[in-house]
Amino acid sequence: MSLHFKVKETGIPMPGRIIHNLDGKTSFIPYGKKGQHLFSISRSTLNKDLLTAADNLPNVDIHCEHKLIAMDIESTKLNFQVHGKVEKQVEADVIFGNDGAHSVVRKEILKKTRLDYSQQYIPHGYKELAMLPKNGEYAMDPKGLHIWPRQTFMMIALPNQDKSFTCTLFMPFEVFDRIKTKDDVIAFFKKEFPDSVSLYGEEHLINEYMTNVVGSMISIKCDPYHLQDKVIFFGDAAHAMVPFYGQGMNSALEDVRIFNGFLDEFHDNMGLAMQAFSKSRNVDAQTICDLSMQNYIEMRSLVSSKSFLIKKHVDNFLHWLMPRTFIPKYTMVSFTLTPYHQVVARTHWQDKIIDRVTKIFGLLSVSLGVILAQKIYQRCR
């Protein structure tokens, strides 16, 4: 079985969002047209599948428990701490840094060149909570991403293969700070997410909330992503983003696809490929960082508004009417290879069309209303 099909087999298809209102009622908002869906995939399972696939390649050696602690760029020598104790030095031809948001590779490059760099911690944290199966089955419908939008904060839930849900509470740190006792936990959830309390079970909810820590979220932008023909870095090391568009891992994998394309274009000339990658990729990487930040507002607040739902209906109608000309933003990001900066430009143009369409429909509605009122008035005279 190919890696592509193996990964898909472990995923749970989610064709849309399931919105939980404060009164307990739910509504479904599809991500795209029929047949389009996201996958909920266990991070640990995916990591195992990817590592197994890499380990089966004849030209790949995997060394676990090696922590990069220093790097000499000129000699391309790297110092690792092995099993938390012994230091080990390795010399490489080329260094590919995929070492995350707090990248040691990027920090070393910062010391050697004029690398533009910025980072932003958002004022909201997150806490994961497990929702266990009920009588051996899912506690909720697994065919969607569950969202409890509450304007300034939200909770989401993703289905797992074992019929549990991984729930995540995203809130300002000061709101987390106000919840100190077991009674505070139950009171807060009964007020803000009342339908979830029985799904968790009070004792389990208290244990999950009091045990699990609050994490922070960072967004990182930098430019360029390489140094000479010696070092290049991808993924979170180059463009860490908040998780609200689900594009962190996707954009990292896309980095590799795009860089591989430049290697083909420049006949494996590493220096030219690195330079071309940095130049072309930066605008898209910074764009998806911004889109991810903006989508938090949509998820926690806008999804429950009537204007948002009307716009989604108009979006979907125009896409059905002109499938090649008009493509909703979420569809472009999640279901196409359209570069992120082109998504933004095209969305801006499409939003103008939607505004005109809604205004026309609004005027037609008013006109029809006036005509109807006149007819009723004339009949009643």
Image (spheres, grey):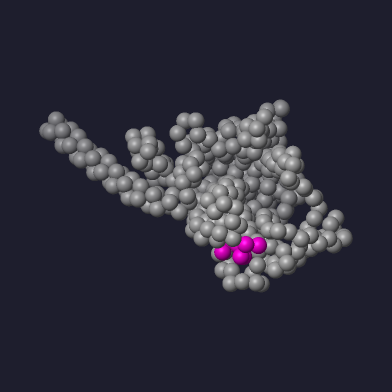
The residue positioned 37% from the left and 41% from the top of the image is 326
In the picture, which quadrant includes the N terminus? top right
Q: Is residue 108 above or below residue 238?
A: below
The residue positioned 52% from the left and 47% from the top of the image is 299
| In the image: residue 378, left or right of residue 180 | left
Judging depth in this view, the residue of 253 and 306 nearest the camera is 253
How far from the left and from the top, in percent, is residue 213?
A: 72, 53
In the picture, which quadrant includes the C terminus? top left
Judging depth in this view, the residue of 41 and 250 nearest the camera is 250
Judging depth in this view, the residue of 338 and 29 nearest the camera is 338
Q: Which stretch is magenta?
A: 224-230
The residue positioned 79% from the left and 50% from the top of the image is 63
How far from the left and from the top, in percent, is residue 105?
A: 68, 62
Q: Is residue 143 magenta?
A: no
How far from the left and from the top, in percent, is residue 257?
A: 57, 47
| In the image: residue 311, left or right of residue 191 | left
